[in-house]
Amino acid sequence: MKKILVFGSFVVDLTSRADRLPQPGETVLGSSFKLGPGGKGSNQAVAAHRAGADSILATKVGRDVFGQVALDFYAAEGMPVDLIMRDDEVPTGTALIMVNEREGQNMILVVIGACGNINDEDIRRAEAQIRGADILMLQLEINQDALEKIIDIAHQAGTRVVLNPAPARHLPPALLAKVDTLTPNETEAALLSGVPIKSFDDAKKAARVLLDMGVRNLVITMGSMGAYVTDGTREEVIPSIKVEAIDTTGAGDAFNGGFITALSEGMDLFDAARFGNATGALSVTKLGTAPAMPHRADIVAMCAREYPDLIIKTRKE
């Protein structure tokens, strides 16, 4: 099993639920509130860890009560905390989440906090792990200058770079050319390619633009439609798995965590996307983000039902 480094964000999720989401200027009474661990980097690392990966998370938190939430959670999960950096000035990030409990849809406002202050000292602390990893997973919830430096180190070392370009923003083609696998959703792929995406035909057109920019492999997740996967020569549409969705928050992170776990075990791009698809589907059947990430046994069981020809190595939880 190959080693995975997830370098990304930790934020504390502040989640409220109601039977509908408010309109601008409107106040809606909610039914519940929950505080818990979140952030795309952290969510993906937790998903990979629970899926059975040999992984470590690099992130940054403040010296505040929310930073302690991170450390307590990782200790409970049995995840290493060697690369959890602390910021003396900038507080831990937060995510304000509103969930429509009738439909499972959500609205999220993220304040990155300490994860937007990754500096050269932090990168030097993680450099050996970046160079030593087989797979590096990144998102866009850290500062851009740090992102570029981390990708440069990984690219020079021959580490496989997987980038989930979320939240959506423009990225320079020179950066994308150093990415081995890009995993946007349809909104992010549309922004990066300039091609509006409403169908799999649109996804194929957007993929061609991104591959021409130098991206080697592409997985465009499209929610309930499924995923479009291509390595530039082969393409495949992987339908979504039908489940009763309770909370879709973090589904993309679950997909990515499962996806990189499968890559680390030697699955090809397409089978890894199937494993990620099962991981994402299971995550929406529970409340929350990181706490809702499924464990390996459940993922393997769903894969056995949905993808009986998929070969999965036997591993301990």
Image: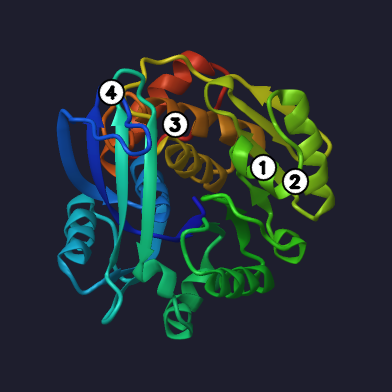
Which disc number belongs to residue 101?
4
Point out the tag, 4 or 3, that comes first from the N-terminus. Answer: 4
Residue occupying image coordinates x 61% and y 44%: 188
Residue occupying image coordinates x 62% and y 64%: 159
Point out the tag, 3 or 1, that comes first from the N-terminus. Answer: 1
Task: Tell me the amino acid under the disc marked 4.
Answer: Glu
- Left or right placement of residue 32 versus residue 183 in this view: left
Dot 2 alpha-carbon crowd within 10 angstroms: few under 14, some 14 to 19, many 20 or more: some
Point out the tag, 2 or 4, that comes first from the N-terminus. Answer: 4
- Determine whether 74 is above or below 198 in the image: below
Task: Tell me the amino acid under the disc marked 3.
Answer: Gly
The residue closer to the viewer here, 142 or 17, is: 17
Residue occupying image coordinates x 47% and y 35%: 313
The residue tagged 3 is: 280
Which disc number belongs to residue 193?
2
The residue tagged 1 is: 189
Task: Tell me the amino acid under the disc marked 1.
Answer: Ala
Residue occupying image coordinates x 59% and y 75%: 149
